[in-house]
Image (cartoon, helix red, strand yellow):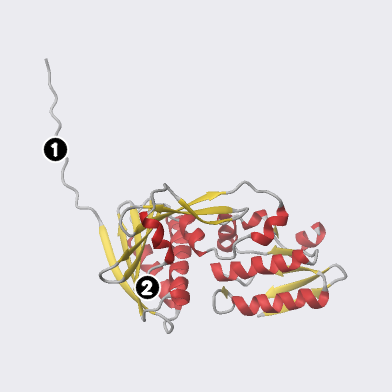
Amino acid sequence: METTRKRPRPYKQPTLMTRQFEFITGSDNLTSALKQMLEFINDNLVANVPAINLLFKSKIILTELLTNALKHSFSRYTLVDIAVEDNSIVITKTDHGMPLSLISYANSSENRIPITHDILHTLYAIPEGKDTIRFGCEESTMGDLDAVEKIVEHFGLIIITKAADKFVYHYNVQTKANKFTVTLNF
Amino acid sequence: MIKILKDTPGHLLIEIEISEANLDNSDLFKTQVTELLDRHKKNIVIDFNRVEYIDSSFLGSLVAILKHAMAQKLDVILTAMRPDVYELLLLIRLDKVFKIYGDYQEAASAI
């Protein structure tokens, strides 16, 4: 009987380009910071990926992360780490200060906890282990348009959750670091 | 921030005069448009042709303006959006609550 032996695959070094950007809250120009970050992503995307779509998603995600830093951060610096890999882009925003109140959901025994709900979406916190939640979003069934008055006017988390393949928030109690990690797969 | 381009018996056409619709100008935009609604008591058509990007703060203001209009039985209609801006509105389903048209002519004939 003829047997076949699997030939070992030649080891292929994964492509991984990373860069850290320092965003000085309150003084840096958001537009110029955003431009630099998008240029880094564009320059390091491998060939044959849907670049226009990935750059659009990266742009709206970074815009919301940086806007969130301007609105809510109590620390002077916000760090944005971007890793462009063979099949994903991982964006991590880190600042230091008090945790989001949402972190109380991390230790819930429920599978998911609604954060906001209106006629457009329900946004969920999904417990992912110690001091970590993942965001999830479901589209609502459109009901009475009179309910427009109840639409939640805060779209930042929903934009990131819907644009991303994975969006996770982690609070490190020791370092007091708030870490938002957004993954785009391709 | 905004400029009135046309004042008809049924509606006002206004243009947003900025390219970056974001946290820096969202509150002012909301104040100016709600004042127009209160003063003119007409539907408002908003021309977005100059807006290159929009963030969640500005989208929040747009929804607040729509709520203000609907409370007065008025409407807010959006026109001339660039593809990226339109894509973002689609992503968060605001096309379900706003009437959106490609240009003013299309909007004017529909309202």
* Local crowd size for mark 1, using a 10 Å CA cut-off: few (<14), some (14–19), many (≥20): few
When asked about the image quadrant of residue A7, the answer is: top left
Residue A78, numbered circle: none
Q: Earlier in the sequence, mark 2 or mark 1?
A: 1
User: In the orientation shown, which residue stands out farthest toward the top?
Assistant: A1
Of residue A126 and residue A9, the one placed in the foreground of this image is A126
Q: Nearer the viewer, residue A33 or B23?
A: B23
Q: Amino acid at mark 2?
A: Met
Work out whether residue A146 or residue A161 is closer to the camera in this orientation and state it.
A146
The residue located at (47%, 67%) in the rendering is A64
Q: CA distance from mark 2 to mark 1?
A: 50 Å
- Are the residues under badges 2 and 1 in a single subunit? yes
Residue ID at (63%, 53%): A119
The outermost residue toward the bottom is A27
- Residue marked by disc 2: A98
Find residue A45 and report its horizontal and vertical position in percent: 35, 58
Secondary structure beneath disc 1? loop
Select label 2 or label 1 by which is in front: 2
Measuring from the top left, give residue A19's x and y in whole percent.
29, 68
Disc 1 target residue = A8
**Can see residue B48?**
no
Q: Which residue is at a point 36% across and 79% down the rendered structure image?
A: A75
Q: Secondary structure at mark 2?
A: loop
